Image (cartoon, grey):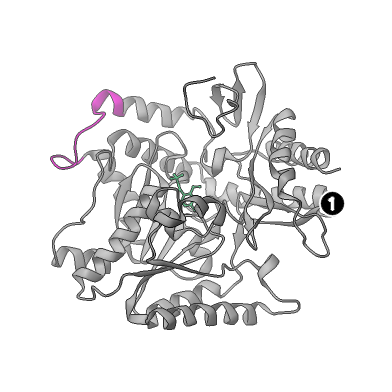
Amino acid sequence: MPQLIHRRLDTAPPLAVKGEGIWLTAADGHRVMDGSGGAAVACLGHAHPKVLAAMRAQMDQLCYAHTSLFSCESAERLAELLVGHAPGGLTHAYFVSSGSEGMEAALKMARQYFVEAGQPQRTRFIARRQSYHGNTLGALAAGGNMMRRAIYEPVLSEAFSHVSPCYPYRGRAEGESDEDYVERLAAELEAEFQRLGPANVAAFCAETVVGATLGCATAVPGYFRRVREICDRHGALLILDEVMSGMGRCGTTHAWEAEGIAPDIQVVAKGLGGGYQPIGGILVSGRVIAALRDGSGGFMHGHTYQAHPMACAAALAVQGVIAEENLLENVRARGAELEAALTERLGNHAHVGEIRGRGLFWAVELVADRATKAVFDPALKLHARVGQEAYARGLACYPMGGTIDGRQGDHVVLAPPYNVTREEVAMIADRFGAAVEAAIP
Ligand code: PMP
């Protein structure tokens, strides 16, 4: 038995020994296309020469300096790149080492903001069911993935409550229009504000496009505008978790750009550093920062590895390549091709309930019955079987057993690198289609 604690204790996954472009090679020589970048992380594929060169240069210069004494150039430049032009009024950045840490920082920043702003009674957070915000205790309490929460429930903060996500495939009533669905969700959110007392709510938290728990579920038009309006009316902050969906994954730098609103605090991670280094962060509005600066003068938070020079240098290089190579355009163009190829191959499959997503962020939800949308017996773990069939065919994808009405459902995510080619998209769709057909004949 291996000493390393793997995700499963009874088996170890294959050893990955090389990554190059979209390809990953295992120790036994098996080569797979990285069709999901892990969990939508590797946005430039592997071993991009410009990123490696930037990392080597940073390594030669400075690997670490503690932020209580020093700043570093790569962190300053990364902040300037992300918020120097104040997108959506977000003017400041704070860098940590993961998405979960980013979420923790967002929650604590929101709480501190209201203490500094003279509203210390704002202690409540509203989030959404069927969401995922990370595995640390604060982020887990915010999340609404019942399976991940279950055994930790007794130790999760009760400051969090949950409303329905915007999930039209299952959440919208028969014949209900977008407008009516949005109004119904808005009424539910409003009722939750009223139940808690609107002046007690610090923030509403949501993934702009739901990643792991629902599989690339995009909101219907107008949903986030109503959410923004409700938060503003009650003086609460809007925290958008774009750990998976942001930094270009959905075809715009920030997924909220497509929704016509901006958050007060945004969490970023995976596409920020593309997996070259562990990095996440929050982007924060000028209003929130001003309250902290005029109040206690600092953020009551901190990590040993925050704004790490190597992580920031890697992220800076990743973002540089995305801009120089005009990759967001490629995300949109190849994304449209991936949607078309998946629809052609699987659109009529008896067990494909929905193919959904945006940009290069696509999921297929598998159902036992298309008419009733009944889920498969969770014991079958069909999502995992699709993953295994795909791996055997030389494709890595991201199978998830998201929770649906408290039960496990099945969806599989594809999230190829932003620099994927047309030919590679066709290969991914082909291998994926074959894997679904093999797993669920
Ligand atoms: N938020 C979202 C939306 C995520 O998808 C994830 C990771 N899947 C996280 C937070 C947590 O990020 P990490 O695993 O880097 O802690």
Q: Which residues are magenta?
A: 58-71
**For this view, does 95 lie left or right of residue 23?**
left
The foreground one among 360 and 320 is 360
* Residue 303 picture location, percent across and down: 26, 43
* Residue 150 picture location, percent across and down: 52, 53
Q: Place residue 419 in its image quadrant.
A: top right
Question: Which residue is most to the top?
Answer: 28
Residue that appears at 33% across and 77% down: 200
Secondary structure character of the magenta stretch overall: loop
Quick check: is 68 in the magenta stretch?
Answer: yes
The foreground one among 282 and 138 is 138
Residue that appears at 39% across and 37% down: 278
Please, is residue 85 above or below residue 225 in the view?
Answer: above
Q: Which residue is mark 1?
A: 349
Picture quarter with the C terminus: top right
Q: Place residue 296 in its image quadrant.
A: bottom left
Residue that appears at 58% across and 82% down: 183
Please, is residue 214 above or below residue 438 in the view?
Answer: below
Under mark 1, the amino acid is: His
Q: Place residue 314 in its image quadrant.
A: top left
